[in-house]
Structure formats: C-alpha cells, structure tokens
C-alpha cells in the first residue's frame, strides 16, 4: 500500500471507535514518511492527548516539530518525552531523546 492510500485509510478512522493513541501515532508516522511534518505534528499532539505517557509519540512529535521548523517545540516535546520515558522505565526512548535534545542545543 502506498503511503498516500494508507494516510487516507487512517484518516477515515478519525472520530470512530478506533480513534486513539495508536491511530494518531500511525497517522503521524505515515504523514512524516510522506513528507508532511506539519500535519504529522497535529497527529502526534493528538496521540499524546489520548495518552500522555506514550513516549514514542513524544519522540516523533519532537522530530516532526524539528522537521517543520520549530526547534523550540521540538525541544519541549523531547523534554516532556524524557520525563515520561524515565517515569515509565523506557530507558532506550529516554536515551534517544536526550541525544536529539543535545544535538538541538548549541554547544559552547
């Protein structure tokens, strides 16, 4: 299935019984793969709205924000994602987001 038709199928499910964190995460990921980081930001924000403890959504929200030109929002997403990941014991996600955040912050 090409990314465009996958996006359409996922969008059709918004507002239905399957609407939730996984749908919005999947739609955000499909949009990023299709090169639409701005729309992906909205979907990842919706994902963390459904489940603020979903660290993978925070990680990709930061990436989508950065790709859409909002470095400040990317940093905020990764900071929140690190806190979530640490609280949940998701060591790998926290480590990855720390690396992204370090790359974002200018070094002296």
Image (cartoon, rainbow, N blue to C red):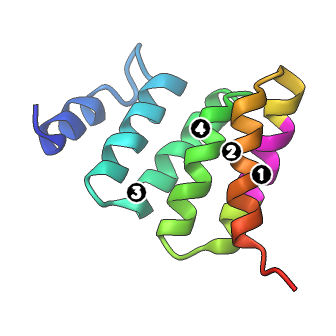
CB contact under 8 Å: marks 4 and 2: no
Q: Is residue 52 visible?
A: no
CB contact under 8 Å: marks 1 and 2: yes
Residue labelled with disc 3? 39
Whole-percent x and y of residue 28? 42, 43
Mark 3: secondary structure: helix
Which stretch did the figure color magenta?
76-83
Residue 98 disc label: 1
**Comes first in the chain, label 3 or label 4:** 3
* Closer to the eye: label 3 or 4: 4
Q: Residue at coordinates 87% horizontally, 86% vertically from top-left?
A: 108
Q: Main secondary structure of the magenta part?
A: helix
- Report crowding for label 1: few under 14, some 14 to 19, many 20 or more residues within 10 A (C-alpha): some
Quick check: 16 above or below 79?
A: above
* Closer to the eye: label 1 or 4: 1
The alpha-carbon separation of the residues under discs 1 and 2 comes to 5 Å
Residue 86 disc label: none
Mark 2: secondary structure: helix
Q: 67 and 96: which one is in front? A: 96
Residue labelled with disc 2? 96
Q: Which quadrant of the structure image shows residue 56? A: top right
Whole-percent x and y of residue 12? 25, 31
């Amino acid at each position: 299935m090409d990314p465009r038709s996958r996006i359409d199928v996922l969008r059709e499910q918004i507002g239905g019984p399957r609407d939730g964190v996984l749908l919005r995460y999947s739609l955000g990921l499909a949009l990023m793969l299709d090169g639409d980081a701005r729309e992906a930001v909205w979907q990842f924000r919706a994902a963390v709205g459904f489940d603020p403890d979903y660290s993978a959504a925070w990680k990709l929200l930061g990436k989508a924000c950065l790709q859409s030109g909002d470095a400040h929002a990317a940093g905020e997403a990764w900071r929140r994602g690190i806190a979530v990941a640490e609280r949940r014991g998701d060591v790998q996600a926290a480590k990855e987001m720390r690396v992204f955040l370090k790359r974002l912050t200018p070094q002296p």
